[in-house]
Image (spheres, rainbow, N blue to C red):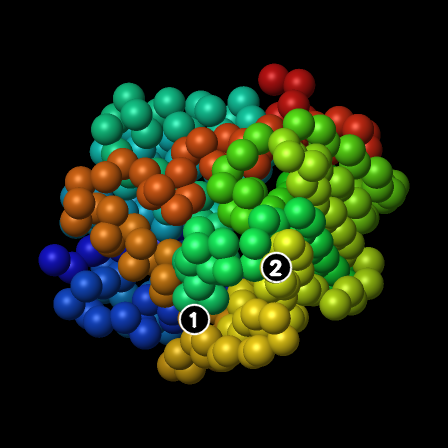
Amino acid sequence: MSIRWGICSAGKISHDFTVALKTLSPEHHQVVAVAARDLKRAQEFARTHDISRVHGSYEELAKDQEIDVVYVGAIHPHHLRLGVLFMNAGKNVLCEKPLAMNLREVQELIATAKRNNVFLMEAVWTRFFPASLEISRLLSQSEVGEVKMVRVDFGVPIMQTPRAVQKDLGGGALLDIGIYCLQFVLMVYNGEKPQCVQATGVCLDTGVDEGMIVTLKFSGNRMAVCICTMAVELQNEAVIAGTKGTVKIPAHMWCPTSLMVNGVETQYPVPDPALPLNFLNSTGMRYEAEEVRQCLLKGLKESSRMSHADSALLAEIMDEARRQVGVVYSQDNQ
């Protein structure tokens, strides 16, 4: 069965996702349509990726009967509206992270998916990399004993990017890159809700967070520390420390291609792209795409690897961290 994809938004991440799909068998994945608010941009995207159908509005894409699933690559303030639009039209949805701006919006998306009996997944691509699957296997078999501490940092200098610093565009370090740190911790601790969330951070004049440090305390005296910043480059590593050993993801933890278990390194390379990419290791988005296909083949409406509950907990923790640091979006007041 070939999954027929519609691409929502003709931006950089949509380009990379479409390139990633090309690394998979066309018998399994086909991009059949693209939509953008600017028809010319959609047409240019279609030419680049050899896509047969072009739509000059997202409403047209929602009505396209030849699509099985829509990839939403628009910026996150638009995720709620677009997710509801496509799911109300009976479309399955893979939506870029963060799934929405806050927990209330995430819950609305989940409710919409259930009401329409369609598949919905937050595109936390990191979770589906072979290296991440190996981490879960190691932890399930207690290869490093009981995990007591997780440390993750993600810092890249992106302050010159309007999308990163403007509040109305959903800017801020936490929602853009800090989410990778938090999702990693929740993956390690099997989606358990932390007992305590403590956050401190610094904000820009625009009202978004330049950087944040979030500490999480879990049952059984287990802890985690997440550091994110869009002002400077950090080591961008993740460390899982257990009573019998350590698992380390060297840079870059959000798109991991190597793993060190008790000092022994194993490589997990991603395929080479057929076209230039905008972001590092983007062909690794192939793994989340294949997860969507497998779920649809099985008739599932959510992925056990990145479930609705996982997305809701992630949003809840980010809401609390933002509350403590003082980052408020217009969506929080609705």
* Mark 2: amino acid: Lys
The disc at residue 283 is 1
Q: Residue at (49%, 41%) from the top-left corner?
A: 190
Q: Which of 109/334 is in front?
A: 109
Q: Can see residue 95?
A: no
Find the residue positioned furthest to the left.
Answer: 1
The tag earlier along the polypeptide, 2 or 1, is: 2
Q: Of circles 2 and 1, which is in front?
A: 2
Q: Is residue 37 above or below residue 329?
A: below
Q: Which of 230/220 is in front?
A: 220
Mark 2 lies on residue: 244
Residue 104 screen position, x and y as percent? 54, 22
Q: Residue at (23%, 63%) from the top-left corner?
A: 29
Q: Which of 258/12 is in front?
A: 258
Q: Can see residue 309?
A: yes
Quarter-wise, where is residue 4 in the image?
Answer: bottom left
Quarter-wise, where is residue 16 in the image?
Answer: bottom left
How many numbered discs sit on the rendered protein? 2
Q: Secondary structure at mark 1?
A: helix
Q: Is residue 324 left or right of residue 117?
A: right
Residue 238 screen position, x and y as percent? 65, 60
Q: Residue at (77%, 65%) from the top-left corner?
A: 234
Q: Residue at (78%, 33%) from the top-left corner?
A: 198
Name the quadrant of the C terminus: top right
Residue 209 screen position, x and y as percent? 79, 43
* Mark 1: amino acid: Thr
Name the quadrant of the N terminus: bottom left
Q: Secondary structure at mark 2?
A: loop
